[in-house]
Image (cartoon, helix red, strand yellow):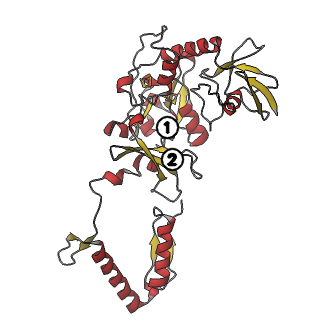
């Protein structure tokens, strides 16, 4: 075990623990921008710098392992002024327009600028606006809001396993993009499969969901309702974001099968049926002669179905029937279906499409 002192608090942690994690065990929060728990440490944004006694240079807490006997200051004058300078550098190429930005109120850059008193960068240059990439059906990329933390690129590569995002150019001209941009390709016609995990990883409004434009919401306005994605059998956990009784979006949760990730269906589509005008809300019975459907009560519809199934079973035997459960149903519903097939239909012809 390693013993150290952080901001006057003694800590004991396993060898190899980073200063950031060690501070967390002592209840000390060190600000970060490029860091995300499930990604390999990058140490590129420099927001998490800390002072280590006897070391003339500040070190990045997210990528520096704590050493025996370290005496660390996470909030000294030197540390705070360096962080402020880092933010001022980030703001040199940031087209801040918080009032109309989708991320307003939930933006990590905005919160840190507020905390460190950065209103605008004294180094700000008149930047030439870069075109917004609107080519993806589900999200927008605004390079003018990008701070090059590369959380999106590393998420796509290290977690989604897609590698659709690349860093183009080098140094001051570095920018986020996709392959073959020079041929006019954007996110919409790249290798991107629109899972949106990069959008959720983005600490600013650079990557934002399009749904948020159709039904605008601030993260401070929504209620989160934890549930299981109904789209397939994987059973990803997510929070439905609800504003004024309407589901406006989703946010991945740390479930046993998804660990904070979602696919395109779960993130952008799995809830749209709830408010769809095409949604069936009553059983419909078809008139065989006219072909027209009419509304029926549940009792009437269920009686009709039971009568027809019973007639088939009695005339042709149970094996003339089968029950195939939808993987979007709950385990309990699927159990009930096979039970009905075995006991009422009197056949073992039952299965489920949970093959994902
Ligand atoms: S990304 Fe953040 S700081 Fe930039 S305009 Fe949007 S809310 Fe403001
Ligand atoms: S949406 Fe998914 S696949 Fe597309 S760039 Fe983002 S993380 Fe990669
Ligand atoms: S798009 Fe967002 S996540 Fe990606 S580098 Fe820019 S600010 Fe970071």
Residue 213 position in % (x across, y down): 34, 36
Quarter of the image with the N terminus in it: top right
Residue extending farthest to the left is 290
Residue 216 versus residue 236 in the image, above or below: above
User: How far is the residue under mark 1 from the one under mark 2?
Assistant: 10 Å
Q: What residue is drawn where x is 26% and y is 54%?
A: 277
Residue extending farthest to the bottom is 315
In the image, is 303 to the left or to the right of 72?
A: left
In the image, is 274 to the left or to the right of 175?
A: left
Q: Is residue 191 visible?
A: no
In the image, is 257 to the left or to the right of 322?
A: right
Disc 2 crowd rating (10 Å Cα; few below 14, some 14-19, many 20+) is many
Residue 109 position in % (x across, y down): 50, 24
Disc 1 crowd rating (10 Å Cα; few below 14, some 14-19, many 20+) is many
Q: What residue is drawn where x is 57% and y is 20%?
A: 170
Residue 353 position in % (x across, y down): 49, 66
Query: Which residue is identified by label 1?
Result: 200
Q: What residue is drawn where x is 48% and y is 11%?
A: 121
Which numbered circle lies on residue 184? Answer: none
Q: Quadrant of residue 300?
A: bottom left
Q: Is residue 128 visible?
A: yes
How many discs appear?
2
Residue 253 position in % (x across, y down): 53, 46
Q: What residue is drawn where x is 78% and y is 25%?
A: 4
At numbered mark 1, what does the secondary structure look like: helix, strand or loop?
A: helix
Quick check: marks 1 and 2 in contact, CB under 8 Å?
yes
Query: Which residue is identified by label 2?
Result: 262
Residue extending farthest to the top is 122
Q: Quadrant of residue 50?
A: top right
Residue 282 versus residue 266 in the image, above or below: below
């Amino acid at each position: 075990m390693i013993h150290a002192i952080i901001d006057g608090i003694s800590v004991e942690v396993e060898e190899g623990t980073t200063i950031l994690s060690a501070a967390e065990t002592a209840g000390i929060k060190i600000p970060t921008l490029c860091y995300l728990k499930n990604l390999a440490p990058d140490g590129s944004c420099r927001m998490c710098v800390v002072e280590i006694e006897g070391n003339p240079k500040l070190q990045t807490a997210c990528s520096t392992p704590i050493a025996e006997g370290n005496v660390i200051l996470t909030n000294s004058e030197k540390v705070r002024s360096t962080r402020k300078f880092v933010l001022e550098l980030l703001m040199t190429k940031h087209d801040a327009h918080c009032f109309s930005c989708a991320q307003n109120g939930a933006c990590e850059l905005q919160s840190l600028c507020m905390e460190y008193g950065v209103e605008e960068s004294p180094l700000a240059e008149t930047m030439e606006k870069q075109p917004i990439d609107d080519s993806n059906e589900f999200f927008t990329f605004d390079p003018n809001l990008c701070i090059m933390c590369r959380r999106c690129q590393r998420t796509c590569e290290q977690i989604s396993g897609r590698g659709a995002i690349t860093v183009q150019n080098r140094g001051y001209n570095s920018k986020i993009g996709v392959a073959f941009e020079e041929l006019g390709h954007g996110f919409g016609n790249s290798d991107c499969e629109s899972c949106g995990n990069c959008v959720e990883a983005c600490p600013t409004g650079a990557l934002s969901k399009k749904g948020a434009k159709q039904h605008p919401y601030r993260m401070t306005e929504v209620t989160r309702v934890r549930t299981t994605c109904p789209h397939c059998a994987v059973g990803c956990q997510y929070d439905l974001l609800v504003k004024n009784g309407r589901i406006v979006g989703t946010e991945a949760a740390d479930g046993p099968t998804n660990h904070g990730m979602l696919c395109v269906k779960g993130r952008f589509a799995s809830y749209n049926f709830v408010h769809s005008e095409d949604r069936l809300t009553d059983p419909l019975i078809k008139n065989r002669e006219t072909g027209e459907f009419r509304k029926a009560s549940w009792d009437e519809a269920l009686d009709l179905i039971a009568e027809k199934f019973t007639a088939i079973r009695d005339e042709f035997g149970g094996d003339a029937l089968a029950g195939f459960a939808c993987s979007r149903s709950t385990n309990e519903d699927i159990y009930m279906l096979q039970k009905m097939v075995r006991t009422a239909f009197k056949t073992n012809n039952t299965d489920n499409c949970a093959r994902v």
